């Protein structure tokens, strides 16, 4: 949704590609401000400028975060266990509560479970429908837990480590929500490997598996918005590709 121009050790400049992304950019900067004020034990990028608009586009400079992400399949369970614990334990300030969505299972047809059951499952190839619906039922059977700060796209290039393996910072909070911390655990596991959750609470690991098992946890951010899906066919194609790879 954005082009990013990097000025190493200085800033990253985000430039929206579409008008809808431009309209969302001020809220996303408020998310960064609220997360940066949460007292997390790692760096979070902060806006360095006001959001500038030009035509249907918008741009903003945010602070630079050193370090690099880890490749797929690589990750220290202790480091990621501490990261997940820090997010889970973050205090939900009024600022975070005001700017972050709380996805609901059911909400007049626009809850995430409503959209998946009513819009996505019926469009899947017949061979996948029953299995996906059963796994969604299993996910819905899990008792809801108090909402925590959830990054929503945790892992890979969004988690920066120093050369010595120390966690430096976490970037790209666009998909942050207030929800089950097991969502972040599932996102970490699908990139870095499920073994990386060894240092994480067993109950969170169990819920993480359930969050990923139905349609792939990486797809869920699109149905967490409380709004109709804008590209249903593309979403279905992506889920089918995930199901085919999953086997």
Image (spheres, rainbow, N blue to C red):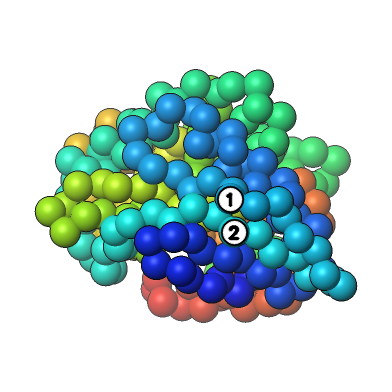
Instruction: Point out the tag, 2 or 1, that comes first from the N-terminus.
Output: 1
Q: Which mark is residue 102?
A: none
Residue 233 visible, this orientation: yes
**Residue at the spot 58% in from the left edge and 50% down from the top edge:** 48
134 or 104, which lies in front? 104
4 or 240, which lies in front? 4
Above or below, comparing residue 204 to residue 22 in the picture: above
Residue 197 visible, this orientation: no
Above or below, comparing residue 26 to residue 201 in the picture: below
6 or 118, which lies in front? 6
**Residue at the spot 62% in from the left edge and 78% down from the top edge:** 237
Are the residues tagged 2 and 1 within 8 Å (C-beta)? Answer: yes
**Residue at the spot 65% in from the left edge and 47% down from the top edge:** 29
Quadrant, the N terminus: bottom right
Q: Is 232 on the left-hand or right-hand side of 78?
A: right
**Residue 13, image x, y percentages:** 57, 65
Q: Is 34 on the left-hand or right-hand side of 114?
A: left
Q: Is 99 on the left-hand or right-hand side of 23?
A: left
**Residue 227, image x, y percentages:** 80, 52
For disc 1, the marked residue is: 48
Determine crowd level at label 1: few under 14, some 14-19, many 20+ residues with C-alpha closer than 10 A.
some
Q: Secondary structure at mark 2?
A: strand
Above or below, comparing residue 234 to residue 110 in the picture: below
For disc 2, the marked residue is: 61
Identify the residue at the far left of this view.
164
Quadrant, the C terminus: bottom left
Q: Quadrant of residue 54?
A: bottom right
């Amino acid at each position: 949704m954005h082009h990013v121009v990097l000025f190493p050790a200085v800033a990253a400049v985000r430039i929206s590609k579409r008008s809808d992304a431009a309209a969302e950019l001020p809220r996303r900067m408020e998310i960064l401000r609220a997360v940066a004020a949460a007292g997390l034990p790692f760096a979070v990028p902060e806006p360095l400028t006001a959001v500038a608009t030009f035509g249907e586009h918008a741009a903003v400079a945010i602070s630079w975060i050193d370090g690099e992400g880890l490749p797929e399949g690589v990750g220290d369970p202790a480091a990621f266990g501490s990261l997940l614990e820090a997010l889970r334990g973050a205090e939900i300030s009024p600022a975070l509560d005001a700017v972050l969505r709380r996805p609901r299972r059911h909400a007049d047809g626009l809850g995430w479970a409503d959209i998946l059951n009513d819009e996505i499952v019926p469009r899947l190839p017949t061979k996948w429908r029953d299995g996906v619906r059963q796994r969604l039922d299993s996910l819905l059977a899990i008792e809801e837990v108090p909402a925590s700060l959830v990054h929503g796209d945790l892992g890979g290039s969004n988690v920066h480590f120093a050369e010595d393996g120390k966690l430096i910072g976490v970037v790209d909070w666009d998909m942050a929500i207030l929800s089950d911390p097991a969502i972040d655990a599932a996102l970490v596991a699908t990139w870095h490997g499920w073994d990386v959750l060894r240092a994480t609470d067993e109950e969170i690991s169990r819920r993480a598996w359930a969050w990923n098992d139905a349609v792939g946890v990486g797809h869920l951010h699109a149905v967490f918005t409380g709004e109709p899906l804008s590209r249903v066919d593309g979403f279905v194609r992506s889920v089918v590709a995930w199901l085919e790879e999953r086997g």
